[in-house]
Amino acid sequence: MGQWYQRKNIRLVNFDYSTPGAYFITICTEGRKCILSRIVGAGVLDGPNVELLPHGKIAAKYIAQLSEFYPDMNVESYVIMPNHIHILLRVLEGPSGTPVPTKQNSKVSRFVSTFKRFCNKEYGQNIWQARSYDHVIRHQADYDAHLQYIYENPFAWQKDELYMP
């Protein structure tokens, strides 16, 4: 009768997400609920500040801990927005400290999965959207643009595609 819904593959085809390099990751809250932070104080001299809410503080704690937990990965920059997080993640050469990654269970996927699991355990519930988004950084200009995007995201919150009042 009905056909099965097939999700669109949002990953780069035939790319091994365990290879060393930089990755831009976006993790959204379920239903895009604004429970992670508030953007406050958009003054002329001082830009807006990200004020972390309780869920956001827990997320920040686990972003920092996962950088220590995975010796072959480094969080180079991140921003915790009201309903999503952007992370610039560097995957390095070397052993992962966890089971050997495969294309289906890459280092990037395991980082995101572990992050969500640790946060949810402390929250006592799942607050995350099932899927995350990632972008493979291909060259220095791409890296610089995503690093700038993380820095400028609070300035453009009301124009952001993930904005929810």
Image (cartoon, grey):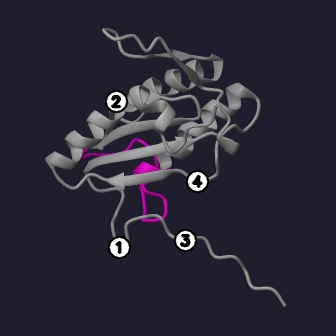
The answer to which of 42 and 37 lies nearer the viewer is: 42
Rendered image: mark on residue 8: 3
Earlier in the chain: of badge 4 and badge 2, it is 4
Residue at 55% in and 71% down: 8
- Mark 1 or mark 3, which is nearer the start of the sequence? 3
Residue 120, given in percent of the width and then of the height, sits at: 68, 34
Assess whether mark 3 and mark 4 are in contact (beta carbons under 8 angstroms). no
In the picture provided, is 147 more to the left or to the right than 103? Answer: left
Q: Amino acid at mark 3?
A: Lys
Q: Which amino acid type corresponds to the residue marked 1 in the rendered image?
A: Asn
Number of marks drawn: 4
What element does badge 4 sit on? Answer: loop
Q: CB atoms at circles 3 and 2 under 8 Å apart?
A: no
Q: Which mark is residue 131?
A: 4
Q: Which mark is residue 152?
A: 2
Q: For the residue marked with disc 4, what is the amino acid? A: Arg
Q: CA distance from mark 4 to mark 3?
A: 11 Å
Crowding at label 3, few (<14), some or many (≥20) Cα neighbours within 10 Å?
few
Disc 1 designates what residue? 14
Q: Which residue range is magenta in the image?
A: 92-109
- The quarter of the displayed image where residue 34 is located: top right
Please state which of the two labelled residues, at mark 1 or mark 4, is closer to the viewer.
Answer: 4
**Residue 85 horizontal/vertical position (percent):** 49, 35
Image quadrant containing the C terminus = top right
- The residue lying at 50 percent from left, 32 percent from top is 158
- Three-letter amino acid code at disc 2? Glu
Mark 1 falls on what kind of element?
Answer: loop
